[in-house]
Amino acid sequence: MPFIETDMLFAFLNSNDKHHNIATRIFTEIESGYQIHIPSSVLLEMELIYKSEGREGDLTEHMVNLLAIKGLNPVPLTPEVILLAISLRQDYNLSFFDSHHVSASLQDDGVLISTDKAFRSIKGLNLLTPHDFISKHLIDRTKQD
């Protein structure tokens, strides 16, 4: 099951984001039954950003709305994710949160939906741009119907 990264959440929540339309398409797929993992680290990063911007009131509303989406499955932070995140920071110079998002994905099937180009060189990670995900998902879904 693919993982989704923070950039797609913010794009979905912000109508002015350049990726808003494609993020909305992805979340429409999730709402219609497609299952996506969301690392707990994404939710924590989101909380930290909102807090730093003094937008905790918005955070409450957005978090409640996101977690109400049945196909969006939070994945808990584990010691294994943390240990791999440390290694990823050392090997790939990833940020703290990015290393946790990638680590969570690698602990599963290694598929991560993101626009972040820093993830391209990570061994074992199957990075999907939002457009790649939509194309692959729509093709796969058509084959199942």
Image: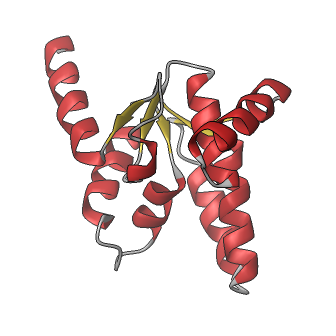
Q: What is the x, y in percent for residue 86?
A: 75, 38
Q: How many marks?
A: 0
Most extreme residue toward the front, as rendered? 91
Q: What is the x, y in percent for residue 36?
A: 48, 33
**Residue at image x 58%, y 19%?**
108
**Residue 46 visible in image:** yes
Q: What is the x, y in percent for residue 138?
A: 19, 31
Q: Compared to 72, does 78 lie above or below?
A: above
Instruction: Left or right? Give the position of 2 relative to 95.
Output: left
Q: Compared to 97, does 56 lie above or below?
A: below
Most extreme residue toward the bottom, as rendered? 54
User: 120 or 40, which is in the foreground?
Assistant: 120
**Residue at image x 79%, y 35%?**
82
**Residue 73 visible in image:** no
Instruction: Left or right? Give the position of 3 relative to 94.
Output: left
Q: Compared to 76, does 18 lie above or below?
A: below
User: 24 or 95, which is in the foreground?
Assistant: 95
**Residue at image x 38%, y 51%?**
117
Image colouring: secondary structure
User: 72 or 85, which is in the foreground?
Assistant: 85
Which image quadrant for residue 23?
Answer: bottom left
Which image quadrant for residue 56?
Answer: bottom right
Instruction: Left or right? Give the position of 12 relative to 24.
Output: right
Instruction: Left or right? Give the position of 10 relative to 81.
Output: left
Q: Compared to 12, does 86 lie above or below?
A: above
Most extreme residue toward the right, as rendered? 79
**Residue at image x 68%, y 75%?**
50
Q: Quadrant of the C terminus?
A: top left
Q: What is the x, y in percent for residue 75?
A: 68, 33
